[in-house]
Amino acid sequence: MFVWGAVFVGAFYLLTLALPHLMSVAGYKTFRIPSASMRPGILQNEFILTKKINSIEDLEAGDVIVFSFSQYDALKFQKEEETDCVIELNQRYLVKRIVAQENDIVELEDANIRVNGISISKDSKSSKMETLNNGRSYLVSPIETYQKLMTRISKNHVFVLGDNRGQSADSRCWGEVPFEAIEGRAERVLFSQSETSGVRWSRVGEKVK
């Protein structure tokens, strides 16, 4: 019995060591989300599974991506005095939602976000649902007004926003994200734990929408 127990423990230990490598070879990675910038879609202290994207054509507006903040010029950061823009700048990786892609025109004004002239939220001041031009819908925690912005997205870049608009450093602050900075697309919640109520079992295994 002791021998079989030792074998089992040894096999489990080896699997634990090998699993991250096997996942990486298959194009998967895991990331811990320390902030609340993507509430309600992704909660604070969740571990998510991402899949590597080989081409920017494989991404769609509405996809949630993880990207390296250190891989592009942080000097694009324009508004250091804005709290919602500096809250996450100490993190190596950020997770956000793609709202627009190359050649799209994004406009932020008052409480409205428009992509190619079409509002993605019909009642932005109170609505908790946004619908992109491709039909993808998701819940957000909105803010009452945006600083005015109008930009056309460059080739091989995406424009991203956090779903929790008042607690997110995103393309409103430092501009577009280049494809080469993208680590992968968020696929599923692997584990979720609240600091106050313990494991959120209902969230484990959920698809990231």
Image (cartoon, rainbow, N blue to C red):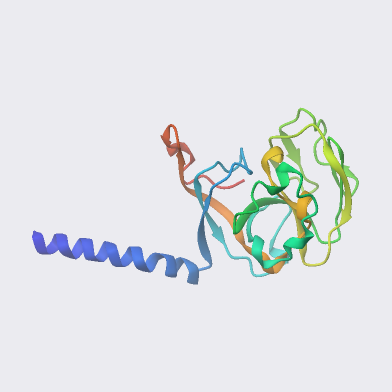
Q: Residue furthest left?
A: 1
Percent x, y of residue 173: 77, 51
Q: Residue furthest bottom?
A: 25
Q: Which quadrant of the structure image shows residue 201?
A: top left
The residue lying at 83 percent from left, 35 percent from top is: 111
Q: Is residue 171 left or right of residue 30?
A: right
Q: Is residue 33 left or right of residue 199?
A: right
Percent x, y of residue 97: 69, 50
User: Of 170 and 49, which appears nearest the observer?
Assistant: 170
Percent x, y of residue 6: 16, 63
The residue lying at 43 percent from left, 69 percent from top is: 22
User: Of 150 and 127, which appears nearest the observer?
Assistant: 150
Q: Residue furthest top?
A: 126
- Compared with residue 188, is residue 142 higher up or lower down, i.e. above or below? above
Percent x, y of residue 52: 59, 65
Quadrant in the picture for the N terminus: bottom left
Q: Is residue 202 left or right of residue 11?
A: right
Can residue 99 be seen in the rendering of this structure?
no
Can residue 166 be seen in the rendering of this structure?
yes
Q: Residue furthest front?
A: 81
- Compared with residue 98, is residue 111 higher up or lower down, i.e. above or below? above
Query: How many numbered callouts?
Result: 0
The residue lying at 63 percent from left, 43 percent from top is: 38
